[in-house]
Image (spheres, rainbow, N blue to C red):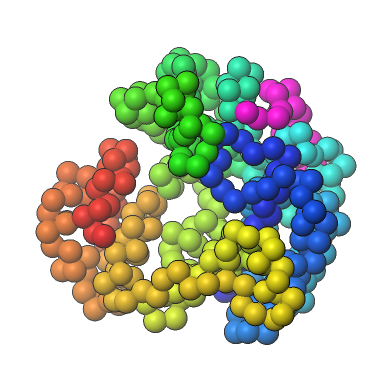
Amino acid sequence: MLGLYLHIPFCRRKCPYCDFFSVAAGDPHFRVYPKLLRQHLDWAAAHGWRGPIDTVYFGGGTPSLLSPRVIGSLLDTVARRFGLTADAEITLEANPGTVTAARLCGYRAAGVNRLSLGLQSLDPAQLVNLGRLHGRNEGLQAVNWARRAGFDRLSLDLIFALPGQTLSALDAELDRYLALAPEHLSCYGLTAEPDTLFHQRVQTGELQLPDGEFYADAFLLLHERLTAAGYEHYEIANYARPGQACRHNLGYWQRRPYLGVGAGAHSFRDAGGGERWAVPPDLDAYGTALRVGHEPAVLLENFEHTGAMSEMLYLGLRTRSGVEDAAFRAGFGRGVAEAFPQAVERLRPWLVFEEGNWRMTVAGWLIYDRLIQEFL
């Protein structure tokens, strides 16, 4: 089985906190981009990538700027070149303000069966602070339209630890989200990434983000409220109703192979210790490579034995299921404790071994970036 990610790097306006590759939707490349994606799919099928595809993810950027007809055409190419499993999970990211009732019905008819809606917040003031182009009512309307279009796998994005946010405000935000009864929630703490407008504002003192103590309190509040409401906290930033976890993203964390198509997309081949490839975030170079029949991606990393072990832990410990020791031993000839005895000992308060799996505690997830360095 193979996962497929298609990067759609166009937005009506770039959000001030976003560091993903994207350009304005008015860019002249927008019109020809679907043709380039089809050429890339054809090239990959002719150069060793094999299906069938069991998960497809349209990410961005703002994939909902592409029409249902274009999305359907791309899925037809995927099915023809690689094959799609009967139960393939097909996800489209969409932003309120770029969709209508008819457009969402069109995506559903085209084969999209999972919608990831970028609400980010239902607080009108915070939506302005985040630079979003939609308001609360547009967000609520988009959810209603999605349900009417037949989307019974709906994921909503929520950003927390916002400037000026209080725990009571976040609690009220969760009330609003839970009232919408999504099958999935992705909850991200706001960060000021380099090369973003928010980072510039933080550097100049124009913007102040909440401190680490507030972030920890907010993270734990999310965990307590959402798990009490029946959601599984199955990955650091993700919650799902039973059976509703994002299969595509689980593939990333479990180091399953996936093909990345589009400028800025990444791929993973599982041959040997694994290889990571990336298409440079350059639309001109992307088009040129495909026109002359060259590999559009460049090799980022070819994993040797130790690097593959480290990455399996780095990715797997992000998830509630963790890392199965027997599978680790089968792949690398040693169990986790044998391969990393000092790290396991030092992380004992946060790293647990239960029912044959190594897992990070929720408290460990709070300081995950620091703790995981023990394995890297």
Magenta span: chief secondary structure: helix
Residue 136 painted magenta: yes
Point 37% across, 51% down: residue: 318
Q: Quadrant of the C terminus?
A: bottom left
157 or 34, which lies in front?
34
Is 260 placed above or below 364 here?
A: below
Find residue 358 and report its image quarter. bottom left
Magenta highlight range: 131-151
Q: Position of residue 249 (x, y in %)?
A: 52, 56
Q: Quadrant of the N terminus?
A: bottom right
Point 67% across, 74% down: residue: 289
Q: Is residue 114 left or right of residue 358?
A: right
201 or 275, which lies in front?
201
Q: Position of residue 195 (x, y in %)?
A: 50, 42
Find residue 254 and report its image quarter. bottom left
292 or 250, which lies in front?
292
Point 17% across, 64% down: residue: 340
Q: Would residue 230 be visible to someone looking at this image? A: no
Residue 192 painted magenta: no
Is 353 placed above or below 285 here?
A: above
Point 61% across, 42% down: residue: 155
Is 361 placed above or below 143 here?
A: below
Q: Would residue 206 be visible to someone looking at this image? A: yes
